[in-house]
Structures are given as structure tokens and as C-alpha cells.
Image (cartoon, helix red, strand yellow):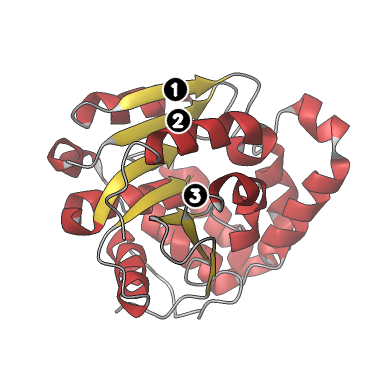
Amino acid sequence: MSVDVHYTVDGPEDGPVVVLSGSLGSRLDMWDPQMAGLTGRFRVVRYDLRGHGSSPVPPAPYTMADLGSDVLRLLDRLKVERAHFAGLSIGGMTGMWLAANAPERIDRLALLCTSATPPGTPEAWEERIRTVRTQGTAAIAPTVVSRWFTPAYAERDPETVSLFIDMIANTPDEGYVGCCNAIQTMDLLPGLPSITAPTLVVAGKLDPTSPPEHAELIASRIPNARMEVIPDAAHLASWEQATFVNELLLDHFGRSSAAA
């Protein structure tokens, strides 16, 4: 069952709508580096995943259909028939589900640093879930964030590293586990060939979580998908290489004014 997720809306009221969907353990403010660039031309909708930030925390487990249905419910609440969608990590997984299962609602799609099948081993996901269940999200936060930024960036900007460690540590345990379950049980590959939305697939060259070969697989299955690899970026490329990512998003979404 879908839930009413927490959201913000910025940008011109009559601009094409762009929905931004974030990473596991993040809040909507993970997209702060994109706002100045996008809100000049687009009506930007950011939201907290279920179980994250200020959104409701239903009991785990969740499925990718749950996460996608939350977005459809959000579009209905906003009276938006059709929107562009950009998602990073689990946000990108949500975007793939939406584009395959509700193609009439998605205009153009951007998939950042994501995977169509569970990244990592089943054992690693079970260990992460077990740790959060017994010790809380704070116990995994430093390890997770160590994969979000390159070592050089982390050394250069320790305040950002601390920001995201705190963000994950403050994510409700139940919500984090529920989204881990959604990733664990997903297989989005069968739906990729049916995606009709013009799709941009972006990988961070140094991303240890969803490396470029994951993006290559996605791009090879979605008809006419375009792929870009960002140098000197790990998993949170939208933050570490914000200028590069913003240029890609503006170009991709700027090719259409169909979203209302």
C-alpha cells in the first residue's frame, strides 16, 4: 500500500516537473547541489523515501512496487499527469520500476549510480540488515559513506562526509531495513526492454557500489539509452561532481517540454 511521502516543490509553477529520488539512507536535501541549476527551468519535486527523513515509516519489508507506488501517489497528490524523473541508487531503481510499470507517467528518465539487480552479495545484505536490527543505522553509517565519495574528496571535504554519516545515522532503522529488503528482492532486468522514456544512464567511474558495468547493463537493455561515465566520482556523483551531473540533467530534461 502506498503512503504519503514528505516532499518539497521548488521552481516555476508552470515549469516542466522533475522528480528527484535519492539514495538509501538519504533525505531529500541530498539533492541540494542540483537545485540552483534545475529550478531556473523546472518545477523540482524532491521527496523522502518511505521510512526516511520526514516520511512515514511503515513496517518492513518493502518492495520496489511499494516505492514506485509512493511516487505515483505523490504525482496524484500534486495533480501531475506526467513528469521527468531522476533517481540515484535506490532512487534509480524506483525510476526503472516506474518507467516499466507506469510509462504514461514518466516523460524522460535519468538513472544515476544504480543497478537493475541487487548490488553486492545476498550475504552482505543480510549482514547489513542484521547490523541495523541489532545496533541501529549509526553502526553502518561510516562504512556506507566511505563508498559514497572518493578518498580524495573525503579528505578534502570532511564536513560533507560528516553530514552524510549523520544523515544515515538518523534514518529510522525500520525504514532502512525495509528499503534494504526492496533492493534484496528486486530484479528489474525483465522490464528494461519495455521502457519507452528517453533514458540517460550515469555512472561514477570510481563507484564501488554500482560500478560502470552495472550502468552498461542497464543501458544495453533500455532501447536507445544514452550512457555517461563521470570521472573522479564514487557513488554520490550528484554531490561530488555536481556541475557535471547538473549539465547532464539540464541537457537531458531540456530536450522535452512535455511534462506538465
Q: Mark on residue 202?
A: 2
The percent position of residue 199, horizontal first and vertical second, equals 30, 35
Asked where in the image residue 59 lies, by quadrant, the reply is bottom left
Quadrant the N terminus occupies: bottom left
The one nearer the camera, 7 or 62, is 7
What kind of residue is marked 1? Answer: Glu
Helix or strand or loop: what does disc 2 sit on? strand
Callouts 1 and 3 close, C-beta under 8 Å: no
Above or below, 90 against 70 in this view is: above
Give the Cα separation between the discs numbered 1 and 3. Answer: 23 Å
The percent position of residue 23, horizontal first and vertical second, equals 54, 51
x 22%, y 32%: residue? 222
Callouts 2 and 1 close, C-beta under 8 Å: yes
Give the Cα separation between the discs numbered 2 and 1. Answer: 5 Å
How many residues crowd mark 3 within 10 Å: few (<14), some (14–19), many (20+)?
Answer: some
Q: Which residue is mark 3?
A: 41
Q: Which residue is mark 1?
A: 228
The one nearer the camera, 17 or 202, is 17
x 44%, y 32%: residue? 251
**Of pointers 2 and 1, the one earlier in the residue sequence:** 2
